[in-house]
Image: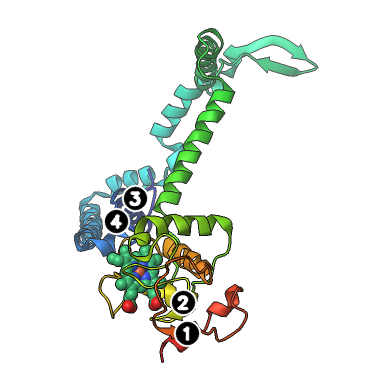
Amino acid sequence: MKKLFPSYVRVPLIFAIVFGGMEYFIDSGDKPAFIEYPMVSVFLFVFLFLLVAIEIVVSAVDRVTYHLLTDEQRKQLEEAQSVSFTDSKFVQNLLSKLTRSKPIEQEGELMLDHDYDGIKELDNDLPPWWVNLFYATAVFAVIYLVRFHVMDAYTQAEEFEQEVQLANAELEKMKANSPKEEITLDKVVLLTDEASLARGKEIFTNACAACHKADGGGIVGPNLTDEFWINGGGIKNIFKLISEGSKNNPSMVAWNKTLESTDIQKVASYIMKLQGTKPAGAKPAEGEKWVEEVAPAETTATATDTLKVAAK
Ligand code: HEC
């Protein structure tokens, strides 16, 4: 029989299969396994080396034996090698087992006496691969019928529901893993929607009212309802101070360790809204009067350049 592949195809093919298999089965994260684990590279290298070495040795042995053969043996060998793969005994046996066909010389035995204007009919056996497939579908049909129509296993609708549930669970997981929205100093803007301000008020009442009073009038901490600010007014300065704490007074701590940046933005927006409420019993003004660089103060766009003013 002829060799199926020449060695220059065989070696790369075997190597590619082993390489692909290692990449598939070794869990190496984002990087390919042979970069992540140097041992894999070493193994692959040695493996390739061995493959090439084996090919060389085998072909050398072949050549030597060929020289030792007598003329007759050489002829036999060449004959054997000239048979193609599909003509080989193995393939022929396999095919006749699968089809149970008779060789053309024995066709006479199969001939039916049907004869239509010289067109004759053969009575071949059904090929076993086909017959067995047919039996298999029959068995499948019985099992299917009993399971889904007699025992009432799940219906298509239930199957659909299950799939949807699975997909939803997957979605939840993805949402939980995706990074939370981060508000940074240069991104922060004044929020005016009800929900954000309500959340801001909630945080203020829970975490800040102890020092700033529930109405913002101030106790330990300064009055947050007037126009005077120690650390500069405007959404950016307030956001920055709440996040990083006050350098002048350690009792106003950095809240970025306890609160999400989105929550700090909300409570800062809520404080901005206390402006001018003049609660009774408020502390006297501290710091400098804050004038927004760009009027009017209500719009979110005014918050942009307030830091510069604070710096002086
Ligand atoms: C333990 C008391 C305490 C708590 C709690 C506290 N603060 Fe303060 N806060 C202060 C003090 C004291 C200052 C004055 C800092 C300074 O002099 O720079 C201050 C200053 C501030 C300022 C700047 C005022 C200005 O005039 O510059 C803001 C805004 C502020 N706090 C917001 C908050 C928020 C929001 C919370 C809740 C998340 C909070 N504070 C919780 C004590 C507190």
Q: Is residue 163 above or below residue 171?
A: above
Q: Residues within 10 Å of mark 3 (few under 14, many from 20)?
A: few
Tell me the residue at 54%/21% (across/down): 130
In the rendering, which numbered label is found on residue 24?
3
Q: Secondary structure at mark 3?
A: helix
Q: CA distance from mark 2 to mark 1?
A: 16 Å
Left or right of 42: which side holds 116? right
Q: In the rendered image, which quarter is residue 261 located in? A: bottom left
Q: Residues within 10 Å of mark 2 (few under 14, many from 20)?
A: many
Q: In the rendered image, which quarter is residue 48 located in? A: bottom left
Q: CA distance from mark 2 to mark 4?
A: 44 Å
Provide the residue designation for mark 4.
28
Name the one closer to the observer, 271 or 112.
271
Name the one closer to the observer, 88 or 186.
186
Tell me the residue at 53%/35% (across/down): 164
* Residue type, label 3: Tyr
* Residue type, label 1: Lys
Say which label, 2 or 4, has the lower sequence index: 4
Q: Is mark 3 within 8 Å of ligand 1?
A: no
Left or right of 181: which side holds 114? right
Provide the residue designation for mark 2.
236
* Residue type, label 2: Lys
Say which label, 4 or 1, has the lower sequence index: 4
Residue 89 point in image, percent of width and height: 40, 33
Find out whether the residues at labels 3 and 1 contact each other: C-beta distance under 8 Å.
no
Q: Secondary structure at mark 1?
A: strand
Say which label, 3 or 1, has the lower sequence index: 3
In the image, which is nearer the foreground, mark 3 or mark 2? 2
Name the one closer to the observer, 258 or 105.
258
